[in-house]
Amino acid sequence: MCRNTGPEDVYVKVLCCGICHTDVHQAKNDLGMSNYPMVPGHEVVGEVVEVGSEVTKFRVGECVGVGTIVGCCRNCRPCKSDIEQYCNKKIWSYNDVYTDGKPTQGGFADAMVVDQKFVVKIPEGMALEQAAPLLCAGVTVYSPLNHFGLKQSGLRGGILGLGGVGHMGVKIAKAMGHHVTVISSSDKKKVEAMEHLGADDYLVSSDSTGMQEAADSLDYIIDTVPVFHPLEPYLSLLKLDGKLILMGVINTPLQFVTPMVMLGRKTITGSFIGSIKETEEMLEFCKEKGLTSMIEVIKMDYINTAFERLEKNDVRYRFVVDVAGSKLDQ
């Protein structure tokens, strides 16, 4: 059950919701902090059904999105700098406790009530199921490119791992005018990376000749791999001052030898989703450039199979649940 719509709240009828790798982690308690019963889902697109008396940003009938976060303290430095995703008291959209002491529940449901600060407008003309993955996967890539000053055209970027976040990485980086190399553990995604997503180059990480030829060639690598992997092969691809930006949630320690970083003044850094402000910017950017995500739309009764397929990387590239068409009330 949703809470009652408070003065700052927006009551959203959920129309569709993307499935993120984190949903699988949380549902299976891979991170050791799951609370049940749980309703996952944090790439939520829906229609405003009701707004609280103090809501100014949204009107009934508008299409809106909700991402990973539904609350923050509003007083700390990140909150005051509009990067509330780094607030230590942020409230996750599910598997967390809201200010009223009740558990938060996500978008695999027929409705959500969310504070207006954490709701974004879906640009007119954007297909709703296309917009869903942008709310997590899209902004996760956009935010570090924005923050680290990597938006100018002509840069050379690498995308490591071609899942939900990786495929958006290719599309967004290409739209910014970057030369994009996809780096993968096998060549089985080469055709789709080059032809469907528009990557410029494709490197197989076990191909030592290809990796050597590509040494010192990239300004940044967006590393989306969500399991343990060595960092050294990828550090060697970076130019002087290049950045390896970690995005995969991995609960085992990674390792590297320090000269790999020192001898090129390279940076290993991380980035976490993006702010509401960046989400709004990224949605406008995607609309302006005509960017879409590649998705497979499913009904709710298929979700367990979808989770299994996602764990095997058997999806191109994001599942989106058609919540409104799933007849949840039956």
Image (cartoon, rainbow, N blue to C red):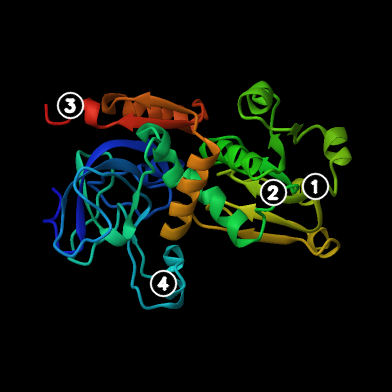
Query: Looking at the image, is 229 positioned above or below residue 207?
Result: below
Query: Looking at the image, is 146 positioned above or below residue 1?
Result: below
Query: Looking at the image, is 316 positioned above or below residue 79?
Result: above
* Mark 1 and mark 4 residues within 8 Å of each other at the beta carbon: no
Q: Which residue is mark 3?
A: 327
* Mark 3 and mark 1 residues within 8 Å of each other at the beta carbon: no
Q: Which sits earlier in the primary sequence, circle 2 or circle 3?
A: 2
Q: CA distance from mark 3 to mark 1?
A: 49 Å
Residue at the image position 36 percent from the left and 65 percent from the top: 90
Residue 197 location in percent, x, y? 61, 29
Q: Nearer the viewer, residue 62 or 219?
A: 62
Residue at the image position 27 percent from the left and 41 percent from the top: 46
User: Dot 1 surroundings within 10 Å: few (below 14), some, or many (20 or more)?
Assistant: many
Q: State the SS at label 3.
A: loop
User: Dot 2 surroundings within 10 Å: few (below 14), some, or many (20 or more)?
Assistant: many
Q: State the SS at label 2.
A: strand
Q: Is residue 68 left or right of residue 220?
A: left
The label shown at residue 237 is 1
Q: Nearer the viewer, residue 298 or 13?
A: 13
Q: State the SS at label 1.
A: loop
* Mark 2 and mark 1 residues within 8 Å of each other at the beta carbon: yes
- Three-letter residue code for mark 4: Cys
Q: Which residue is mark 2?
A: 221
Residue 199 location in percent, x, y? 69, 32
- Three-letter residue code for mark 3: Lys
Residue at the image position 69 percent from the left and 53 percent from the top: 152
Q: Which residue is mark 4?
A: 79
Q: CA distance from mark 3 to mark 4?
A: 38 Å
Q: Quadrant of the C terminus?
A: top left
Q: Nearer the viewer, mark 2 or mark 4?
A: 4
